[in-house]
Amino acid sequence: MEPEELTFQLLREITDGFSKERKVGEGAFGAVYRQGVTKNGEDVAVKRLRDGNQDIEYRHAQFRNEFYNLTKVKHKNIVQFLGYCYEIEHTNIECDGKIIIVEKIHRALCFEYLLNGSLQNHLSDESCGLDWHTRYKIIKGTCEGLKYIHKDLEESLLHLDIKPDNILLDKNMVPKIADFGLSRIFGDELTRTTQSPLGTLGYQPPEYIDRGEISEKFDIFSLGVVIIRIVSGPEGYSKHLDMPSDEFIDLFAHLDGSISQVSRNWRKRWQATCSGGFLVEACCHQVETCTKMALNCLEKDSQNRPDIFTIINKLNEIETGINELPQKRRKTGYGMTMHNHLKLTKEHKMITDQHQHSKSMISSRSNLITSGNTQEISLDVREELIVGREMKKINMATLLGSMPEKIIILPIYGIAGIGKTTFAKLIYNDTNFKYYSQAWVYVSPTFDLDKIGKSIVSQLSEKENQVDEIQHISSCLTKLLSGKKIMIVLDDLWENNTFQLEDLKAILNPGDSVKIIVLVTTRSAHIAQKICCNIEPYKIESLTDKMCWDIIKRKADFEARHDKEKLVRIGKEIARKCGGVALAAQTLGSMLQSMKYDQWVIVKDSDIWNETISKDASLPNHVLASLKLSYISMDDCLKSCFTYCAIFPKGHKIVKYDLIYQWISLGFIKPTKIFSTSQLCEKYIAHLMGLSFLQHSVSPTTYGAYGEHDTAFMMHDLVHDLAISLLGDQIFYQSKQANTAGSSCCYALLADCSKPLEWCTSSPARLSALHFLDCRRTELHGAAFEPAESLRVLDLSKCSIQKLPDSIGRLKQLRYLNAPRIRDRMVPERITKLSNLRYLSLRGSCAILALPESIEEMESLVHLDLSGCLGIERLPESFGNLKTLEHMDFTNCKNVTGVSQCLARLTKLQYLNLSNCKHIGRLPRELASLTELQYLNLSDSSYLSGNELEEAEFLGSLTKLKYLNLSSSNQPCINRLPEALGRLTELKYLNLSHHFTMKKLPASFGNLYNLVHLDLSGCSLLQGVTAALNGLTKLQYLDLYAYFSFHPKKGKKVLCNLSELRHLNLGSPIRSMSPSDQDKINGLLEWICTLTNLEYLNLCYNDDISSIPETIVNVRKLHTLDLSYCHRLQKLPASISEIEGLKFLHTKGCRQLVLDKSMLPQHTSSSENSPHFVVHNYVGESSRHPFRVEYGNHGRLKISRLESMRSAKEAQTIKLVEKTNITRLALHWTRDAKRIVDDAEVLRELEPPYSVSEFCLEGYNSVIFPSWVMRVGAYLPGLASIDFSDLPSCNNLPPLGQLPNLERLKMRRMDSTKKIDADLYGGTGAFPRLEHFRIDGMKCLEEWNTAYSSDEDGFVFPYLNFVEIRHCPRLRFKPRLPPSIHDLRVDSSDEVMLSGGDAVAMGASTATRLYVECCVVPLHRWSLLRHLPCLERLTIINCSDLTCSSPEFPQGLNSLKILTVDGCKGVASLAESLEDLTSLTELGVINCRDIRTLPDTMSKLTCLQTLIVQGCESITSLPEWLEELTSLMELEIGNCRGIKTLPGTIQKLTHLQRLEVFGCPELIRWCESGENEMKLAHIQEKVCSLTIVVFF
């Protein structure tokens, strides 16, 4: 039962004016009154929110929160919500001598009245009061209620104020949780922080008191306090606080043979009513168990508290135990024995649980079934079918246009099919509003404010191709609508909730527009009265019989009939039966068109007019009767096709080819000798559209590329009702029917894919079609479908499929399986047992690594969609045996191979999409065998590489081809096309874009006379295009963007032949060669203005366009004109204002253009195609930090300032997972900024598309991650780069090691992370391709465990090459460095250098380079060096202590060749043990200002070839032992002013080839003096100062 809306006057009457006598309780926010007996004979309670001016917004928010949460919960242990009152009363008062109108808001909630009041009134110690059974029942019932809101709802609900006052008891002492004013909706397993005051002192857990942290464990803590007080009285919790847990439990147990007072009191009561000691002991066990459980709930660490499942299971155990004991009959407080009472309770629980489960599946998810799509509908209204509304429309349009109010909301109401939508279209298209920005939203029975808002904003933002980039209407309408006139239509509004309607009115009135007119269509006069603003609702009256007859005549083509005179009387009688409803007249007219005279008579006299078509009395029976007559006239196959459409919910977008595949799979289509299956399907679609049983869901004026989109339909609500009524018990909607489906059910639409199918239908074996809806958060279980043995259609597209169950193989009759986005790595082998399967879609299953080897057993497979299956690298050898395949889609299967080897056998293929398949090899000749092919997409595939295509004359055999895409978005591959292209005369779509190296088209190109769509954008060097276009008179879409060889004169001749053009893009190419060419440009523009079918015209980046001709007015259908960056454009023609359909005019970058906005439509203001949108968040005032969506080049997307998200739903509307063109994604929260919604809730809704290869997450502040991050290997297997930055609260790392393609990983400033270990690895085989790993600012990171738990599994990171560790002061390796590392960089991370104290345990590493910076630990303690036997290069920078007293230091560095010491201030000398670095070939001492001399032991470095001394100001001379460095070849001395001479022994360095000196003035003079010339004569190259001086 849904809550009823009540008037305040009614509540005032039944509570005696809210009298004190009626008051039964009072709290902080209001009082509770007991109402008199209702008409149903039941008492109810009224909770009235307190009036007053203080904290108005908070009180209102509290009321709304409780209202919305109560509507979600229906359970025997939750107080039943019956009704509500939200009423605004206007009163006149005098203020300063003036009469002003004051609003007073009355708010109240109505509940069932619970006779025994709150639990608080019944608490007592164990010696008196409630008996133990009653107390136990209250504990159990409270836990059941808590389990329901925590676990059984679609989204977890936290109560956050569990206490005895909020647990009410009915007449049978059944507990019911009440007061949901503080409750919060939570996602799965989330923890968040808040600053809001929650709960009651004494019931709040420590994590909330200390850190403001809330989770399910908040309620568990409160439950523990409640249980203790139930067991031992109101002082029980105080006792717990005053003693250790063990002592408190001992109050209820034996202590050395003595019994505590509490236990004795319980025993006295039990012994008086029970026989034998078994029951007493069992009850004692119950008390003890409940107490221990309560104490566990009070654990300080929330992670150690049990969840509600654990508590319920424990209670069930002790309940079962006591029920099995023999008991003495005794009277309970309610006149029955305890045994009978417990038995009754158990039986009642079993029955109630079953009922509640069924009810919760239906009621709690009822909002899931209808889609609430805010999609476009066709806005064209055929004038010849508009009857009887012309004058009403004119009068209403005139009235609306003349009203001065800034906001007008006009509701249009009437019965179904009466013409509400048509009337709204008439006003919408009226010329009075041609200058208005407009939006049309289909609302549907399921009201979704976010979707409505998103649709309005996307339509008004002039972003046709990115309609879901702006997510929240309240945060951007002010900017978007400022200074404009707006018209919005909200079609088919069903919502009756006052709060929702008030919210809707609020977002429709941003307050800064010139004028907003909102048209609302609804069936309800009550809703119309609520939503109207500044105008009375308009009721659509029925058409007259004459008007209905006029419609019938037009639809039936009556005037062309030879027998029309005989039919007039019959036709008028039929018209009278339409009841004045246009839809009925249209349907009947279409049906009667092909009927003869006697059939007209049968229609007139049909008994159907007197039948009751639908059990729903609110539906107009005469309209349904007319629709049913049309249905009866159909052939049997078409009847089945039509009624099956009822499985799609109202407002649902029905994709044409999905519908056709399902029709075929169900056996509805029987091919004839004349028509094929596909032809019959097309015929049926056309027939249903002619009857108005199907309608286009997208306006036909919105032109799309041929073959690039699926046509979509929707059904009128009344037509849908007819289909439902015709099917009767054959169809089951889980949300609409409280009981299970009957034995005759054939089609089912379910809202939970995790529950057994038997719970929904008594005869699952009869089901032939099964759909699920909105189950993205529910994991699919095999039990949800496997009992349906006769199933032919199974649609799992709305389910979360972690693993496709093996039981799928049992559905032997299955023909259609739609199972996208599987997260598992394998497809079950048993799927190949589906030998009858025709349609299989696994699209987006990026984790799948392979197809079953026995796939050839699927011998009936016709349609296979594997698009986005990135993980598949090899096709099974038997794949080529799928000889029945007609449709094969491998889009974005980047790694797949073996395709070419299969093609020769797949000769029935009609559709082949290999777009973005990078590894399928070169273009094979086998492609020529696919002579049935009609669709071929090779864009960005390896088939376009090399020169094979240029010589591929065999392509001429594909004579049935209608669609060909050879475009390239990366590097151009095609230089020329084969002449055989001209033989593809059936071709309608051809895309050759972005091949800028292609210079000419084949001579035969003109033979493609059937082309409708041609894209040559980016083919900048192409010649001869204008000549090739001459014969292509059927072209409707032509894109020549950046085609620089376009000449105005030749272009004019070509365009004059292209009269069918609807889309023309001449961006960039129009250029004048001389002043005379300007006239040719103007002539070209004149010719363009003769293309009367043109809808889209792009002339951007044409500098030589200075004006647009006045004849542009002839292009009446034009809706988009792009003149961006036409720098010389100075003016627009005055006639542009007369183009009624013009919606988008882009003039960004037109620097000389002065716009006269008064002559432009409001919706054609100068728009900017910016790559991002800023959305402001309004909470009282504009937020200074809106979240931001930025699109960059090459598939980049960044969403920043996510902290300003107002709800998780707002993030959901971005539909990020559907943006499969994104490859680089960044999600950014501002660190330490205030949050409105927990980051984890937002991130849960921002699941990336499978196409993402680079992912950056920054500023995320939640403790844990949502499920898609924790299973990232299944969701994003293509990830190659990850950057986690500024994640201060995260202490549980996701298993990134399971990403098979990850190459680069960066983790920065994650303050709570202490270990890198198994959590990050996720199992064995971790990080199979990781090469670069950077860790920075991890101040709490203590351990990096580089090995698996088992020695047999070895080390992680098999290919890790580069590791950088910065500012990680506590980090150590355990047991050792990953052995594959070659380059290690350590900065300000001293403990890393101390890793590996145990040389044997740690083992050796193959690292060859080590870079150490800012280490204060003495060099001799650098234990890490002992385990780097392969180290060849060591760089030490800014380290303060290079003392090395231990001789062990250099012993392990036998391979060291290069040593650099740089910027080590305070270091007075280098280590004496350098002499042991026997392999050292280069030594650099740089910027070490305190070193005075080089150690004598360096003289033993006989392999040293290069010595660099720079910036060492304290060194005054080089040692004489320099001569012992006999291998020295290069000596560099710089900025060492103290060195004035070189030692005399330098003459003995006979291998010295280069000497460089700079920044040492005296030393330079010494070198350049004549007397030292002979000492340096043997050195070939000498560089002094800043000038290179070479002495020969």
Image (cartoon, rainbow, N blue to C red):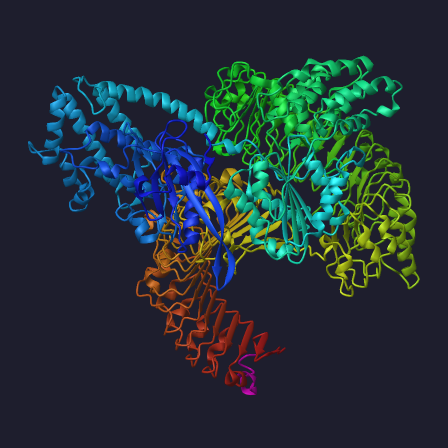
Side of 383 relative to 343 (left or right): right
In which quadrant of the rendered view does residue 69 lie?
A: top left
Nearer the observer, 807 or 528: 528
Nearer the observer, 1472 or 1146: 1146
x and y, in percent, of residue 1012 in the image: 82, 38
Residue 1274 sits above or below residue 1588 on the image: above
Within the magenta stretch, is there residue 1568? Answer: yes
In which quadrant of the rendered view does residue 1336 lie?
A: bottom left
x and y, in percent, of residue 632 in the image: 70, 16
> Does residue 882 appear in this view?
no
In this picture, which residue range is highlighted in magenta? 1567-1577
Nearer the observer, 730 or 340: 340
Residue 277 sits above or below residue 915 on the image: above
x and y, in percent, of residue 735 in the image: 51, 28
Nearer the observer, 872 or 1044: 1044
Residue 1110 sits above or below residue 165 on the image: below
